[in-house]
Amino acid sequence: MKPFTVHTGLVAPMDRANVDTDMIIPKQFLKSIKRSGFGPNLFDELRYLDEGQPGQDCSQRPLNTEFPLNLSRYRGASVLLARENFGCGSSREHAPWALEDYGFRCVIAPSFADIFYNNCFKNGVLPLVLDAAKVEELFQALYAEEGYQLTVDLQRQCLLETDGTETAFEVEEYRRYRLLNGLDDIGITLEHADSIRDYEAQARRDRPWLFDAVSAEQGA
């Protein structure tokens, strides 16, 4: 998982509330658990005029020319600006997988669904909560300026706008630590690899018959 320290990126709008996980990545794409390759199908029902299917060549599909991610001014965006309750609906890690695979490092919204919020931190995407009035200000600035960028500084926990305005935010320390160091669940576990090996060695000494039984089963 890529660490998130300070990120400056082009901002794209998702100017609607209650964007659910099925809108982020539709259910037909959940058959894969590879964690990659979902970017072309992010917001599939909004980006395209036909129904997408797994493995389909999206470069040949008809585009919804009014959808922001299909507009040239938002091409290459890595910060998504959204409204209330982003990521609601069913639980699926595929949603942050799709956002990250597309290239989004941060989603800014007044609120997020709890499970989606937690899944983002486990998959290298920062879900940044700001109050609704501030989000509205950002939307107005975004629409007024083509090429609008924001800098998200997770180390200092502040958002920096192009005019120099800084807005403080808070991320729970454990989640912040994981993102700063690029640690998913496996990475967190491997931080304790030495202790795990010591425990296993001690267990083998204390209860050798358990390991003998496992070895016998594997050899059968």
Image: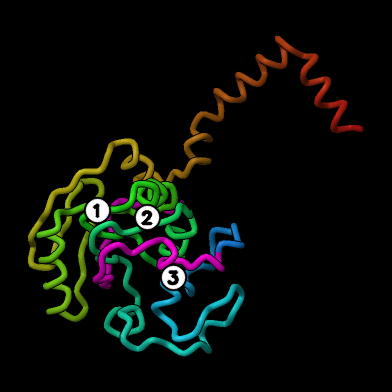
Q: Badge 2: few (under 14), some or many (20 or more) residues near its Cα, within 10 Å? A: many
63 left or right of 218 in image: left
179 left or right of 185 in image: left
The amino acid on which the numbered mark 2 sits, given as a three-letter code, is Val
Q: Please say if the residues under marks 1 and 2 sit with CB atoms less than 8 Å apart.
A: no
Among the two numbered marks 3 and 1 on one chain, the one whose residue lies closer to the N terminus? 3
Residue at 49% across, 85% down: 50
Q: Nearer the viewer, residue 209 or 162?
A: 209
Q: Badge 3: few (under 14), some or many (20 or more) residues near its Cα, within 10 Å? A: many
- Percent x, y of residue 12: 27, 72
Mark 1 lies on residue: 111
Figure quadrant of residue 75: bottom left
* Whole-number angstrom distance, CA of label 3 to CA of label 1: 20 Å
Residue at 59% across, 79% down: 56
The answer to whether any part of residue 11 appears in the image is no
- Percent x, y of residue 134: 11, 59
* Whole-number angstrom distance, CA of label 1 to CA of label 2: 15 Å
Mark 2 lies on residue: 125
Mark 3 lies on residue: 42
The amino acid on which the numbered mark 1 sits, given as a three-letter code, is Ser
Question: Mark 2: which secondary structure?
Answer: loop
Q: Which residues are magenta?
A: 1-29
Among the two numbered marks 2 and 3 on one chain, the one whose residue lies closer to the N terminus? 3
Question: Mark 1: which secondary structure?
Answer: loop
In the figure, 10 relative to 96: above or below? below
| Colouring of the image | rainbow
| Magenta-colored stretch includes residue 15 | yes
* Whole-number angstrom distance, CA of label 2 to CA of label 3: 14 Å
Marks 3, 1: nearer the viewer: 1
Question: Mark 3: which secondary structure?
Answer: loop
Among the two numbered marks 1 and 2 on one chain, the one whose residue lies closer to the N terminus? 1
